[in-house]
Image (cartoon, grey):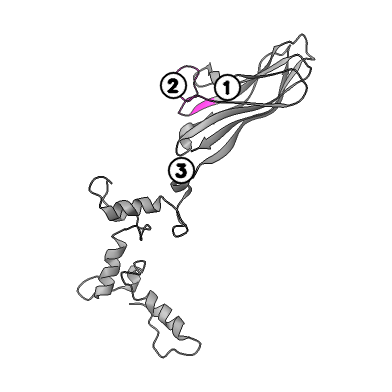
Amino acid sequence: MGLVVESPPGAGFSTDIVDAINGANAPTALNPMATMADIPVVPGPELTADELAAINGANAPTALNPVATMNDMPVVPGPELTADELAAINGANAPTALNPMATMNDISNIGYRTEVLIAEGFSTDFVQGIRARGQRIIDPSEWPGIVSFTVRYMLLCSKPGITTRALLYNLTDNETVSDSILTHTGDTNYAVVEHSLQIGVAPGEFRPTAKMYEVRLEVSAGGVDATDIATLTQASLLVTGV
């Protein structure tokens, strides 16, 4: 049955400490987290009512016992779940101050935002034409919940009047992602341009499964020679979970 400290307590032990030790080794319905080491090795008739209540409580999840695992419930959750079992599942997926053990997957519904770098720091000129950089596999299914994707470029023109164009190219399917074609025209200041991507399987859509992508850059208008330069400082994918 584990360590039991005799009362009156010995030297150095207060009454509260003794009660705490004995309480930890005396599982009850209110203390279902006691381990098997705290009860007889072979459960049987020698178990007390409190010990049986503790075992039954640990295996009967409720809204007040959301720590119970799926192993404590039917193998395939469905109509056979009781109200208490459903409450336990819902409680585990609704983190509160009383349930700080919920994982990030359990709180995905609160929303998140992350930025995935695709390419950075390259240029091309009117004579060189299209240049590519930043081959990367992107799989939208890796992010939990309902997710939206936005492509963002930081672009620079070397002269007023020329146009810098960037786009995301799907190397796996050999096609341009239509919504990713963005431009910056006119001045010599960096410009941040972005656009949301339509997820789908039609040609030109951002695919819902893993694909290899790269960023392509060019001087698309207004250029006459190699002094007309398009620069991409950074290309990234903004991932937003809702």
Q: Main secondary structure of the magenta part?
A: loop
Along the polypeptide, which appears first: circle 2 or circle 3? 3
Q: Residue at x 36, y 76 (%)?
A: 25
The magenta-colored residue range is 197-212
Check disc 1 and report the residue beneath it: 180
Q: Are marks 3 and 1 in contact (CB under 8 Å)?
A: no
**216 horizontally vs 70: left or right:** right
Q: CA distance from mark 3 to mark 1?
A: 27 Å
Amino acid type of disc 1?
Ser
Q: Are marks 2 and 3 in contact (CB under 8 Å)?
A: no
Q: Residue at x 48, y 32 (%)?
A: 140
Amino acid type of disc 2?
Val
Q: Is residue 10 above or below residue 98?
A: below
**56 horizontally vs 148: left or right:** left
Numbered circle sitting on residue 82: none
Q: Position of residue 153 (x, y in %)?
A: 65, 27
Amino acid type of disc 3?
Asn
Q: Would residue 202 be visible to someone looking at this image?
A: yes
Snapshot quadrant of residue 37: bottom left
Quadrant for the N terminus, please. bottom left
Along the polypeptide, which appears first: circle 3 or circle 1? 3
Along the polypeptide, which appears first: circle 1 or circle 2? 1
Numbered circle sitting on residue 109: 3
Check disc 2 and report the residue beneath it: 201
